[in-house]
Each structure stands twice: as C-alpha cells, then as structure tokens.
Image: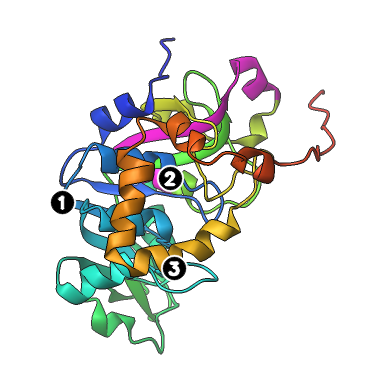
Amino acid sequence: MDSKVVSMKEAIAAHVRDGDTVVIEGFTHLICFAAGHEIIRQRRRDLTLARLTPDLVFDQMIGAGCARKLVFSWAGNPGAGSLHAFRRAVESGALEIEEYSHFGMVARLAAGAARLPFGVLRNYMGSDLPAANPRIRTVACPYTGETLATVPALEPDVTIVHAQRADRQGNTQVWGLMGVQKEAAFASKRVVVVVEELVDEAVIRADPNRTLIPGLVVDAVVVEPWGCHPSYAQGHYDRDNDFYVDWEAISKDPGKLQGYLDEFVYGCADRAAYLARMPGLQDRLRARERTCAGVNYGF
C-alpha cells in the first residue's frame, strides 16, 4: 500500500480549505497546536472551528483571523481564565457562536460517525441552552413517549487528531486520556493524523486493541514530534502549565497576541523552528520512563 506520510505543510494545504468546518480534537491531552499554527501560517479564512473544549489553540486561530464561527461546549483557558481573543471576537460581532453541552457535542459527532441525522440525549432538561441555540430540539421517544433532546449530526470537512504513533497507512494508536477523537475521525470527510512517532505496521498489529483510528478513514499522516505543545502527549512530554498561565496576559493584550503570532507562528517555518525558539523546553517537559506491563495475545 502507498504511504500516506506527508509534511504538515502539505497536509494542511491539501486538506484544509477556506470555509471548511475544522475539528482539532483531544481532551486536554493530544491537542495538535502544530496543525493550528500551520493553518494560521497558510492564512486560511472563514473557518467554522468545532471542538468540545476550545482552549488556547482556537484562541490563537481566532486571534489570527482564521475563523468566522465557533461550535463548542465550553471555552476558556483551563485553570487560568478567559480566552480573550475569542471574547473580543464575540463581543465585536466578528465571530458567530453555536453552543452545546459537552455531551451535546459528543452526541453530534457520534451521530455524524454513524451517518445518522441527529443525536438524542437527556441532559438539556432544566437548561437555558435550548433557548439560546435553536438547533437543540426535541423528539418524542417512539417506545416510551418521553420527550428527549436532539442535536444535529456534525460531519466536519476535516478532523485533525494527534496521537502517539501510527504506521504509514494511518493506523493510529493512542493511550492516556482520550476525548472524542475516534467519533470525530469517523464523522469527518477528511482526516489528518499527526503523530509523535512513525512505526512499522508490525508494531501496530502486535497491539491491536490500542488502535483508535484505522487507516481506512485517514487521508494523511504527519510525523511531528512535540506537535502538541503546550498540550501534552502521554509518554512523550508533559503539559506546559506555565504557558497556559502566561497566555492570560498574552491574549488579553491584542499587541502581545500579535507579537506572539509573529514570533512563534509566522516567524517559524515549521515545528522545529518553533522549538528552537524555546531552549530548554524539551529537557524541562520530557516524560520519564514508566512502561506498563505487556499482554499475551497468544491462543
């Protein structure tokens, strides 16, 4: 089979287009900032950004002018405060928003993955969200008559997932904290997988239960070590909590935000150049060895 391995620049150029609905998934863990930065560098515009918990990566993309709409379930800088580029864009009318609960977004992606028109859930009872979002509706259960909430399926144009490893065909393995990477990938028209390590197919086949996303739904594989920073990749490097705290002051000041983008995004041709601007970072955050016991797949 032909290899799907390409550079980040090639993957974004081929699969992220102006006006697309773009999902960059990962729940605290495995958030692909490297892909977000390349989208900014390629100056994509009018994107609908979708994510359960848009944090710094979407704040940077909104601040860079990439987005016209955000579809989300919570937005903030976890543990530090607001997303100020996001806040300014909403308050100025430059950014449209469409808000759901966490499980509402999960249900949307799960419905998209199953090629169903909508997802069903209970968790809007007593909530003001249906009044704020007319796309949250209700249906009568055909078995009990109970009134249930519904949300429309989400089928992104492109989903970008970061993972620890994949083979050249895109069979992708993840361990540690997970979000809705699998559902987002299966719901999407195009899928870009970004990995810390490219491995032989035999490595994937030796531990099949760890494969979260099969190569059959993957369009491109990008090998980008440290591509999640300031997020983290279990077993590779830790979360850069200092950066999340520092982002509060950066994002609050439009001039500082532009200065950050100029230095660390537009001023860097790729992830290697980005890392070179932060000497000592890799030594500070690199994960220590803690290997789990293997399993016997014999029969």
Q: Which residue is mark 1?
A: 46
Where disc 1 sits, the SS reads loop
Where disc 3 sits, the SS reads helix
Magenta-drawn stretch contains 55: no
Magenta-drawn stretch contains 202: yes
Q: Which residue is mark 2?
A: 33
User: Does 158 sit left or right of 226 as displayed?
Assistant: left
Closer to the N terminus: mark 2 or mark 1? 2
For image coordinates 41% across by 10% down, the residue present is 2
User: Does 29 sit left or right of 259 as displayed?
Assistant: right
On-image quarter of the C terminus = top right
Q: Which residue is mark 3?
A: 248
Residue 169 visible within the image: yes
Q: Is residue 168 above or below residue 289?
A: above
Disc 2 from disc 3: Cα separation: 17 Å
Closer to the N terminus: mark 1 or mark 3? 1
Q: Identify the amino acid type marked 2.
A: Phe
Segment tinted magenta in the rendering: 184-206
Q: Quadrant of residue 141?
A: bottom left
Q: Residue 284, percent across and down?
A: 67, 45
Q: Residue 129, percent across and down?
A: 32, 81
Q: Is residue 117 above or below residue 282?
A: below
Q: Is residue 155 above or below residue 271?
A: below
User: Does 62 sit left or right of 37 as displayed?
Assistant: left
Q: Residue 255, percent across and down?
A: 28, 61
Disc 1 from disc 3: Cα separation: 25 Å
Q: Nearer the viewer, residue 229 or 51?
A: 229
Q: Identify the amino acid type marked 3.
A: Glu
For image coordinates 20% across by 54% down, the residue present is 65
For image coordinates 39% across by 63% down, the residue present is 250
